[in-house]
């Protein structure tokens, strides 16, 4: 084992600073229970923030001797890490933002399992029950502020993007912050880090010291997309479906930058929800944007949406190429419409209760080879249901690309097989092939072997 690895004890932050004896005992006990492996893996990902890696299996194998323990004290708990990545420390002390993220892992992995998923009072089957669970997790994480006006812009995009695309995301974040808008992303590198980095400068120029940089992730993806240290509120949802619902319930508008399969999954999830008839009157600004070099990427995405979901889906977003100020102006105007709509309807500014999210978008999808092969990928269904199934297909590809469990399944059983209508599968194959050619599936420098096979 390298001598560079670090052992340390970390003092509590935030809500963990003052605990009851019962809470101390419960945290200590539960941290070594069935959730220990998820707790260990997510905390390792947090400590590897900034590491040039997008492979959950590789991260866990590189730091196989890493361990974390909850140590009880008289008034609270400390976290003890052993054989931790050295990048999380400066002169032997853990970076404060990373320490905060470490306790966020403890809060979300241990608390959520014991207080929500393990509690029969929470109905995780019905649409309303799942939405309640999403609300409770976000509220427990302290993300809500009643007096804050609508200003949270969700930014989606790939972790594997070019330096030109990354710089563009920073410019957009900067322009958003100049207009007093906040940023929410999937919290990882690339298009998830750039907008936050740009926004810190914009907020500093406006002397805005309450800037919100919200990062929302889930246990399966966190190792591949370790939270960047700019995130000042980290939330780890139990699964990808609740993560996506958290984005659309808390965000007041969405900007999509270039990305790969994960970004396509997010787009399909969002469009599937906006296509539902109960959401047609609700304002929800959506902008696809990138530098001039990314124009072809959005042309292909737009063509795929038109070929699969139809013209109504295309009407739900606008595409703005190479113009960060225009993106920020349009988003600010769209969010003002959201504010007026929420005010008129009496809905909360901090959580969109009125948005209809049907169970097709909430039910956790396990990307096994059988489930992937049996997806209903045909046009003989409502567009929002097709969007739900396409979302699942791309979710499986993300799993096979970067998640530890998915990578191991593909290594054992071979590529996932996707089959459906010939024209639809041809459109999907062309889109995925363009992602591969543009090196959007893995970080640059890594050879990509497809984890999927398209069968018409």
Image (spheres, rainbow, N blue to C red):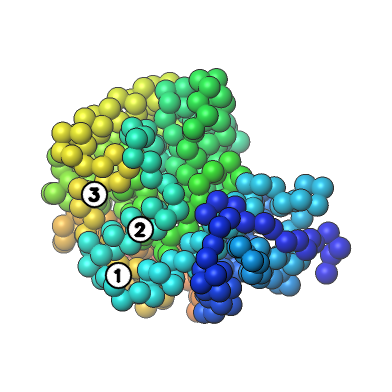
- Residues at marks 3 and 1 touching, judged by CB atoms closer than 8 Å: no
Front residue of 114/130: it is 114
Residue 213 visible somewhere in the drawing: yes
Q: Nearer the viewer, mark 3 or mark 1?
A: 1
| Mark 3 lies on residue | 353
| Mark 2 lies on residue | 136
> Which labelled disc corresponds to residue 122?
1
Q: Quadrant of residue 422?
A: bottom left
Q: CA distance from mark 3 to mark 1?
A: 17 Å
Residue 296 placed where, x, y %?
Answer: 43, 36
Q: Nearer the viewer, mark 2 or mark 3?
A: 2
Residue 379 placed where, x, y %?
Answer: 20, 59
Badge 2 element: helix
Front residue of 57/253: it is 253
Q: CA distance from mark 2 to mark 3?
A: 13 Å
Badge 3 element: loop
- Residues at marks 1 and 2 touching, judged by CB atoms closer than 8 Å: yes
Q: Residues within 10 Å of mark 2 (few under 14, many from 20)?
A: some
Q: Residues within 10 Å of mark 1 (few under 14, many from 20)?
A: some
Residue 298 visible somewhere in the drawing: no
Q: Classify residue 100 as left or right of residue 6.
A: left
Q: Is residue 65 above or below residue 77?
A: below
């Amino acid at each position: 084992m390298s001598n560079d690895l670090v052992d340390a004890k970390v003092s509590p932050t935030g809500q963990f600073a003052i605990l009851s004896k019962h809470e101390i005992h419960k945290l200590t006990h539960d941290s070594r229970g069935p959730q220990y492996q998820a707790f260990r893996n997510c905390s390792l990902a947090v400590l590897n923030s900034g590491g040039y890696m997008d492979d959950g299996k590789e991260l866990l194998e590189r730091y196989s001797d890493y361990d974390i323990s909850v140590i009880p004290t008289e008034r609270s708990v400390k976290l003890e890490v052993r054989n931790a990545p050295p990048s999380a420390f400066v002169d032997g002390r853990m970076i404060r933002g990373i320490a905060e993220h470490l306790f966020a892992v403890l809060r979300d992995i241990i608390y959520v399992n014991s207080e929500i998923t393990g509690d029969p009072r929470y109905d995780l089957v019905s649409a309303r029950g799942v939405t309640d669970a999403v609300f409770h997790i976000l509220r427990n994480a302290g993300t809500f502020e009643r007096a804050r006006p609508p200003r949270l812009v969700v930014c989606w995009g790939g972790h594997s993007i070019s330096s030109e695309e990354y710089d563009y995301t920073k410019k957009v974040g900067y322009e958003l912050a100049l207009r007093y808008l906040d940023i929410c992303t999937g919290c990882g590198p690339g298009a998830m880090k750039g907008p936050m980095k740009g926004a810190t400068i914009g907020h500093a120029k406006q002397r805005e010291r309450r800037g919100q940089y919200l990062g929302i992730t889930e246990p399966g993806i966190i190792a591949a997309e370790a939270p960047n240290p700019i995130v000042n509120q980290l939330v780890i949802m139990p699964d990808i479906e609740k993560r996506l619902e958290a984005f659309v319930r808390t965000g007041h508008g969405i900007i999509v930058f270039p990305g790969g399969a994960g970004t396509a999954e997010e787009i399909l999830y969002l469009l599937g929800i906006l296509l539902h008839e109960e959401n047609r009157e609700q304002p929800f600004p959506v902008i696809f944007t990138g530098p001039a070099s990314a124009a072809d990427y959005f042309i292909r995405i737009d063509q795929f949406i038109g070929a699969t979901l139809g013209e109504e889906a295309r009407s739900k977003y606008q595409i703005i190429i190479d113009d960060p100020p225009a993106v920020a102006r349009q988003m600010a105007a769209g969010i003002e419409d959201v504010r007026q709509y929420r005010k008129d309807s009496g809905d909360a500014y901090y959580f969109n209760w009125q948005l209809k999210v049907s169970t097709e978008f909430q039910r956790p999808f396990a990307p096994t080879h059988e489930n992937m092969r049996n997806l209903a990928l045909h046009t003989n269904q409502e567009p929002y249901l097709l969007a739900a199934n396409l979302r699942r297909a791309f979710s499986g590809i993300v799993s096979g690309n970067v998640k530890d469990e998915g990578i191991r399944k593909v290594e054992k059983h071979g590529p996932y097989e996707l089959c459906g209508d010939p024209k639809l599968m041809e459109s999907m194959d062309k889109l995925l092939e363009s992602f591969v050619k543009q090196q959007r599936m893995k970080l640059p420098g890594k050879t990509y072997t497809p984890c999927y096979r398209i069968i018409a």
